[in-house]
Image (cartoon, rainbow, N blue to C red):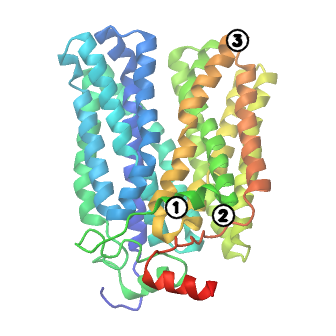
Amino acid sequence: MQSTQKPTHVRYLILLMLFLVTTINYADRATIAIAGSSLQKDLGIDAVTLGYIFSAFGWAYVAGQIPGGWLLDRFGSKKIYALSIFTWSLFTVLQGYVGEFGMSTAVVALFMLRFLVGLAEAPSFPGNARIVAAWFPTAERGTASAIFNSAQYFATVLFAPLMGWIVYSFGWQHVFIVMGVIGIIFSGIWLKVIYSPRQHPMINDAEFKHIADNGGMVDMDQDKGKGTKADGPKWDYIRQLLTNRMMLGVYLGQYCINGITYFFLTWFPVYLVQERGMTILKAGFIASLPAICGFIGGVLGGVISDYLLRKGHSLTFARKAPIIAGLLVSSSIVACNYVDVEWMVVGFMALAFFGKGVGALGWAVVSDTSPKQIAGLSGGLFNTFGNIASITTPIVIGYIISSTGSFKWALVFVGCNALVAVFSYLVIVGPIKRVVLKEPPVSGPETNNKLSQAHS
């Protein structure tokens, strides 16, 4: 590390990389949705089959969270994340070639490739949380986490029009190829730019000291993957997390927050067309407005949280205040049931997604609470619970609409998700602090001798 008086700001470069990779991540998730209609016509796929293909990502993504977190803890963020980016991008490229097969083979190939994209992306968000915990002091972690998390909205705003144009101009195959190639190139850039704080060639002593002295877990990945033995996380650690009241409250909160997210990612455009009578073209444009508001709210939530910390408020208050206030605002989605004017409907939807963005500080809380030994696994467990909503929410809303013939109770369901998350943070979570794990007892001569002395 070079030595200068003025601190460098390498951590902001690291944050830019996290923002960019998360934007690519969400864009690759959305490729199938953008290409879906054209792909359906070309391959002769019915709606039910397309629905199963859509679901393939979610099942694999949830299943891969704990193994992905373990790999991050075992081998470090840099190598595992780079492998993750390269692999999911390769599988994205390959989706562009399924049309070369017959219909039945193409459907199976597409399902398997979507499944593999979900599996390969599993380490991404736990990896983001680990890198933020290593590179950012506690008082900057809320903003950093909010910025990388807000990339999900930015991806919709930036790439949805681009991918739509590619499908319209060149065909659905080219969306997968273009987005996949972007990811493969980025995996090489990642290897050049990402290091742990102690090992980064661009950081100086002043910045390192600032991070280390103010809560950054700078040595989280030290020496991993260099031939030294790094113990994988013990299963008892998972038991301890699953029996920790604070963490269970955080998991429940994230499940409910993601329930709101997946309404907007799946049923919202359908609501605009079927319930509000908009054209598909108009609904596509309108659907981007909540994403913009979600992006603004997402960044603002982190900034407010870190501002409260710098003003001397406790970590618990600084994290909970934006989460609770934002989610209370998000419950305003139910007001859409009581207005008929189009601009008011869109306004309440945008307000709801803005509030959800402000309240989406779960990843900052994970960076604040994860034990050092299993920061990746802790993030994986958190993301597992959160993304179960990607499977359940579209199905539950589908049943509600099918049984009632209307979206009214579906919106009530989404609003209730926000209120349950508020309850979880108010009543279940309690004080926010880093979990200290108990090491499982080691059996051996020394232990046995101590036990026999204690017994006598």
Q: Secondary structure at mark 3?
A: helix
Mark 3, Cα crowd under 10 Å, few <14 / some 14-19 / many 20+, is few
Q: What residue lies at 75% left-to-right and 35% top-to-bottom?
A: 416
Q: Earlier in the sequence, mark 2 or mark 3?
A: 2
Q: Are marks 2 and 3 in contact (CB under 8 Å)?
A: no
At label 3, the amino acid type is Ser
Q: Earlier in the sequence, mark 1 or mark 3?
A: 1
Front residue of this view, candidates 434 and 405: 434
- Looking at the rendered image, the disc whose residue lies closer to the viewer, 2 or 3, is 3
Q: Position of residue 294 (x, y in %)?
A: 59, 43
Residue 329 in view of the camera = no
Quadrant for residue 417, please give it. top right
Mark 1, Cα crowd under 10 Å, few <14 / some 14-19 / many 20+, is few
Q: Position of residue 59 (x, y in %)?
A: 45, 34
Q: Which mark is residue 236?
A: 1
Quarter of the picture containing the C terminus is bottom right
Furthest residue in direction right, as rendered: 338
Quadrant for residue 376, please give it. bottom left
At label 1, the amino acid type is Asp
Q: Which residue is mark 3?
A: 403
Q: Which mark is residue 305?
A: 2
